[in-house]
Image (cartoon, helix red, strand yellow):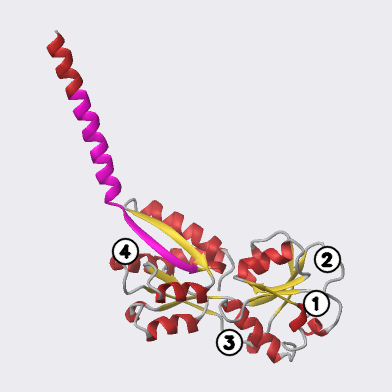
């Protein structure tokens, strides 16, 4: 009897061990994609990730969100990444010239626009970009032009309106577009300049004006597979998903054009 119990315990232990091993092997089979993407894509990409993962049980996606300039620098310095989704063509061109992304995979997948926002509690807010030349406010938050695409577009707008130099003492710099949005939400700046898609996700700000597209470089988002990707096939498949009908529908849901 004791021998029978011992054998049963041994068989149970082996079964549990086999189950754990099988579970571990199943987990190990999952392809892990790391996507470096512009902060303005945060909400849309969260849903794109959720939908793609639900349709691909063998893939798990990790998002690395930030300003396109900083993300491009990370890739230049060898940081691991499978896909780069940029908010500016210049940052993608930078990586293409250095042969850090697959040239054949580069694709423009969406567009955006620039808006002037104010905190929702602001009384009698400005109604045009030109009024930024008035002395009716103290702080304007913008993205850092050297590293943040929305900051570069903002600088072009303000230079076109001949307001870049006059506004220097009022500028509050953000490390990415979401920080600019937060500055206005928290009242650290009365106004901010962000993408229209970022303004849409906040119930604490209002759009008071939209920049004329002629005032700045076209806001086009390119995506590409990073050349050092460990999973180039899966990375390309996700990029195809983003640019396909389902991906476009999700992007449009969040205000992308």
Q: Residue 27: horizontal and vertical position, in percent?
A: 30, 47
Q: Position of residue 81 (x, y in %)?
A: 38, 67
Report the side of 114 relative to 207 (left or right): left
Compute the Cα span from label 1 to label 2. Answer: 12 Å
Assign a secondary structure to mark 2.
Answer: loop
Q: Is residue 231 above or below residue 51?
A: below
The tag earlier along the polypeptide, 1 or 3, is 1
Q: Which residues are magenta?
A: 11-37
Q: Nearer the viewer, residue 210 or 148?
A: 148
Distance in Å between CA atoms under marks 3 and 2: 30 Å
Give me the residue at 53% from left, 67% from top: 41
Q: Earlier in the sequence, mark 2 or mark 4?
A: 2
* Magenta span dominant secondary structure: helix
Mark 3 or mark 2, which has the lower sequence index?
Answer: 2
- The residue carrying mark 2 is 122
Please rate how many residues cluster around mark 3, counting C-alpha atoms within 10 Å: few if below 14, some from 14 to 19, many from 20: some
Q: Dot 4, crowdedness within 10 Å: few (<14), some or many (≥20)?
A: some
User: Looking at the image, which residue is at 62% across and 79% down?
Assistant: 151
Q: Is residue 55 magenta?
A: no
- Residue indicated by mark 4: 234
Residue highlighted by disc 1: 127
- Residue at the image point whose x is 86% and y is 77% from the top: 136
- Point out residue 239 in the picture as x, y percentages from the top left corner: 39, 69
Q: What residue would you read off at disc 3?
A: 217
Spatial CA distance of label 2 from label 4 is 47 Å
Question: Which quadrant holds residue 14?
Answer: top left
Q: Tell me the residue at 41%/78% (across/down).
A: 107
Distance between mark 3 and mark 4 Cα atoms: 32 Å
Cα gap from disc 1 to disc 4, whole angstroms: 46 Å
């Amino acid at each position: 009897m004791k021998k029978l119990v011992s054998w049963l315990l041994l068989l149970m232990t082996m079964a549990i061990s086999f189950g754990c091993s099988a579970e571990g092997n199943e987990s190990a089979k999952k392809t892990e994609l790391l996507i470096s993407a512009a902060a303005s894509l945060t909400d849309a990409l969260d849903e794109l990730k959720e939908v793609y993962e639900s349709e691909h049980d063998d893939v798990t996606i990790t998002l690395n969100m930030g300003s396109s300039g900083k993300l491009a620098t990370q890739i230049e310095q060898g940081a691991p990444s499978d896909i780069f989704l940029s908010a500016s063509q210049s940052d993608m061109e930078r990586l293409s010239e250095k042969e850090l992304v697959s040239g054949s995979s580069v694709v423009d997948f969406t567009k955006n626009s620039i808006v002037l926002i104010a905190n929702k509690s602001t009384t009698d807010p400005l109604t045009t970009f030109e009024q930024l030349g008035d002395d009716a406010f103290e702080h304007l938050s913008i993205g850092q032009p050297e590293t943040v695409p929305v900051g570069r577009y903002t600088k072009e707008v303000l230079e076109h309106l001949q307001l870049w130099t006059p506004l220097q003492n009022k500028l509050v710099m953000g490390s990415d577009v979401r920080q600019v949005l937060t500055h206005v939400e928290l009242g650290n700046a009365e106004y901010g300049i962000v993408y229209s898609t970022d303004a849409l996700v906040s119930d604490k700000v209002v759009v008071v004006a939209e920049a004329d597209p002629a005032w700045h470089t076209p806001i086009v988002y390119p995506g590409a597979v990073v050349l050092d990707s460990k999973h180039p096939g899966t990375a390309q498949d996700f990029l195809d998903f983003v640019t396909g009908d389902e991906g476009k529908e999700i992007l449009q849901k969040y205000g992308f054009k």
